[in-house]
Image (cartoon, rainbow, N blue to C red):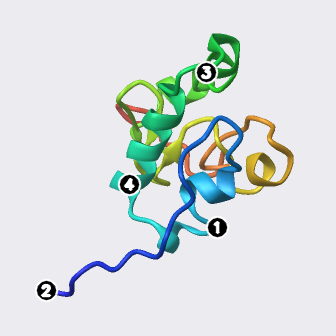
Amino acid sequence: MEQLKFDFFEPVTLRISFEDLFGKKASDMPGWMRKKRWQEWKALPGQDEEVIRGWRPQLLCLECVDFEDGDWCYNHDLPCSVNPILSFSTGMPGFACMGVAFEKKGGR
């Protein structure tokens, strides 16, 4: 089995960018590490609860087969509300799947 090698990642801080928190692309960091860093960011001392609420999953995410653990999209290994294009470039919430990979629980 190939041993995983990680480059240095920026420490998790309140003002970290999404790119530094999750990696520029999915292959930069394994999903378990992305999720761990997301949990660390939400739990930082001084974190604003309003900010956390602003990144809650969209209602559509709650019905998706890839939604689990309160706010995580397992298909994209990102928080449900973090869009890899929109959120990374503008800081605005969106959908991790960009709305294209949505699959309703229990079929359509």
**Label of residue 100 in the image:** none
Q: Amino acid at mark 2?
A: Met
Q: Tell me what residue is drawn at x 38 percent, y 54 percent.
A: 33
Mark 4 to mark 2: distance in Å? Answer: 19 Å
Location of residue 59 (image quadrant) = top right
First in sequence, mark 1 or 4: give its number.
1
Q: Position of residue 102 (x, y in %)?
A: 55, 43
| CB-based contact (under 8 Å), mark 3 and mark 4 | no
Q: Tell me what residue is drawn at x 71 percent, y 50 percent.
A: 17
Q: Amino acid at mark 1?
A: Lys
Q: Which residue in the structure is indicated by mark 2?
A: 1
First in sequence, mark 3 or 1: give its number.
1
Q: Which residue in the structure is indicated by mark 4?
A: 33
First in sequence, mark 2 or 3: give its number.
2
Q: Position of residue 56 (x, y in %)?
A: 59, 22
Task: Describe residue 68's horizontal placement relative to residue 90 as left or right.
Answer: left
- Locate the N terminus and report the quarter of the image it occupies: bottom left
Q: Amino acid at mark 4?
A: Met
Which residue is at the front of the view, 95 or 34? 34
Mark 3 to mark 4: distance in Å? Answer: 20 Å
First in sequence, mark 2 or 1: give its number.
2
Q: Position of residue 48 (x, y in %)?
A: 66, 16
Q: Position of residue 66 (x, y in %)?
A: 41, 42
Which residue is at the front of the view, 9 or 82? 9
Residue 108 in sight here: no
Q: Amino acid at mark 3?
A: Gln
Q: Residues within 10 Å of mark 3 (few under 14, many from 20)?
A: few
Q: Tell me what residue is drawn at x 76 percent, y 56 percent.
A: 85
